[in-house]
Amino acid sequence: MHWRPAVTLWLLLAAALGAPAAAAAAPRVEVTLFGEALCPYTAKWVTDTLAPLLKFDKEFSDIVDFKYVAWGNAHNTTTQGVQCQHGSNECSLNRVINCATHHYPDQAKWLPFVNCLESAPLRQMLEAVDECADKAGMDAGALHECAEGQQGEELEREAARQTDGLCPPHAYVPWVLVDGVPLGESFDALKLFICVAYTGNPKPAHCYDPPAAAASSAAAQLVLPGVGHVTRPTASA
């Protein structure tokens, strides 16, 4: 089954329209990445789509609660233990990432670390851990101790459990969810989906940028029962 952008927009907008108005601050939008360290597509999404949005735009980083579950297409075997799609180095890096997000839960801390890792050449990513940790103000020794020890194994099992529990199951990586709704092949339109899901007012200024052609086409197909065609808000709305 292909998860179409119109379906995703429908689910997110329906949830937003059904949310009761309240004086309290709107809840953050939950964005979850299910990926794996050495996947070139995951790396590209982190460096080209996610990091610029959250690292350099405070309006978005203030309304998004981002999580990275590093397991991806790995699987357990009865004879050889955990097997990662891109080999043992990927298993090690997945554990490092899971340890980083566990020990430094503030995304403003660990996202620059992950972005640094994913910006390194794939064959050199494992060697970049110490340098990236230093740049992010993290304790590289603590990350290695976690990743190579029992805690790293426990976090790995939890990442596997969360990935295996996806409904629908992930079809590839990166597999991105916004408020629990999978974006499918439209993961590059993350900004649009965050803007739709966020119930606060005002929305970030960049929510009113002209949409990309693919996102605009998806929005044009969006029809809600009893509402009709739904269009993006204008800057004056």
Image: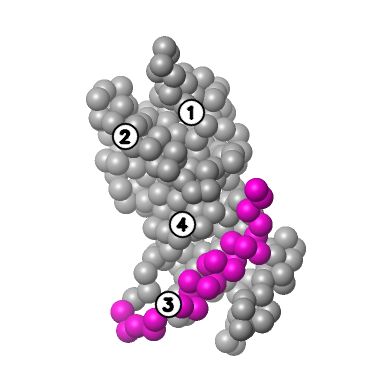
Location of the C terminus by quadrant is: bottom right
Report the number of numbered marks: 4
- Please say whether residue 22 is one of the residues in the magenta stretch: yes
Residue under the point 40% across and 35% down: 160
Q: Nearer the viewer, mark 2 or mark 4?
A: 4
Residue under the point 29% across and 41% down: 102
**Where residue 60 appears, x then y in whole percent?**
47, 64
Depth check: give the residue in front, 120 or 233.
Answer: 233
Q: Residues within 10 Å of mark 3 (few under 14, many from 20)?
A: few
Q: Earlier in the sequence, mark 3 or mark 1?
A: 3
Q: Which residue carries the number 1 mark?
A: 74
| Residue 160 drawn above or below residue 112 | above
Check whether the beta carbons of the residues at disc 2 and disc 1 lie within 8 A of each other.
no
Q: Amino acid at mark 2?
A: Leu
Check whether the beta carbons of the residues at disc 1 and disc 4 lie within 8 A of each other.
no
Q: Amino acid at mark 3?
A: Ala
**Where residue 196 appears, x then y in whole percent?**
54, 70
Q: Which residue carries the number 3 mark?
A: 19
Q: Which residue carries the number 4 mark?
A: 180
Q: Residues within 10 Å of mark 4 (few under 14, many from 20)?
A: some
Task: Give the CA separation, mark 1 to mark 4.
Answer: 21 Å
Residue 155: which numbered mark, if any?
A: 2
Residue 97: which numbered mark, if any?
A: none
Chain part drawn in magenta: 1-24
Q: Earlier in the sequence, mark 3 or mark 2?
A: 3
Q: Amino acid at mark 1?
A: Ala
Depth check: give the residue in front, 113 or 38.
Answer: 38
Task: Give the CA separation, mark 2 to mark 4.
Answer: 21 Å
